[in-house]
């Protein structure tokens, strides 16, 4: 799945750069949490998410933590690096953005829930719906 087309497909939702940045940060976080759960039997990175009541500064602070974990676990790939780069670019484009805690965590959680689509290249739309 071409990644640029995802944001275009949902352009009414992803109408600002901060939403794209927070979403992609959620994507990368979902990947790390899944890796930790599968390989270690627990997900200590979950503590960094503050019960999904993060503020702007908390989400922005996750980027270096994510990079560190990708390197520590040796799970960096072309896809993870591309998504990290894209998230960084969108944070730069967003500048001094404002959003409520609920808005931030809603967008972040959507990203966490959709990490397979971006990191593993799995496309949910092709799955059969019941």
Image: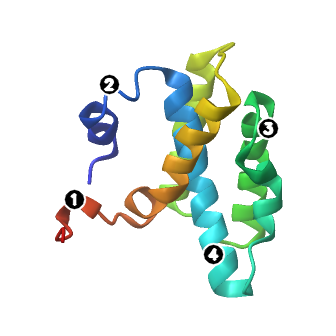
Quadrant of res 43: bottom right
Q: Which mark is residue 17?
A: none
Mark 2: secondary structure: loop
Mark 3 vs mark 4, CA separation in Å: 22 Å
Residue holding disc 1:
125
Residue holding disc 2:
12
Image point 75% across, 80% down: which residue? Answer: 42
Q: Which mark is residue 58?
A: 3
Residue 76 visible in rendering: no
Q: Residues within 10 Å of mark 2 (few under 14, many from 20)?
A: few
Quadrant of res 5: top left
Q: Position of residue 53 (x, y in %)?
A: 75, 42
Q: Position of residue 63 (x, y in %)?
A: 72, 44
Image point 42% across, 56% down: which residue? Answer: 118
Mark 3: secondary structure: helix
Mark 1 vs mark 2, CA separation in Å: 18 Å
| Residue sitting nearer the eye, 1 or 42 | 42
């Amino acid at each position: 799945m071409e990644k640029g087309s995802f944001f275009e497909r949902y352009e009414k939702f992803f109408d600002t750069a901060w939403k794209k940045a927070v979403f992609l940060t959620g994507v990368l976080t979902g990947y790390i949490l899944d890796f930790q759960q599968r390989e270690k039997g627990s997900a200590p990175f979950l503590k960094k998410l503050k019960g999904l009541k993060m503020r702007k500064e908390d989400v922005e602070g996750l980027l270096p933590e994510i990079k560190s974990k990708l390197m520590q676990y040796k799970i960096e790939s072309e896809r993870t690096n591309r998504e990290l780069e894209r998230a960084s670019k969108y944070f730069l484009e967003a500048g001094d953005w404002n959003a409520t805690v609920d808005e931030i965590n809603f967008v972040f959680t959507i990203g966490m829930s959709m990490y397979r689509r971006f990191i593993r290249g799995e496309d949910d739309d092709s799955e059969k719906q019941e």
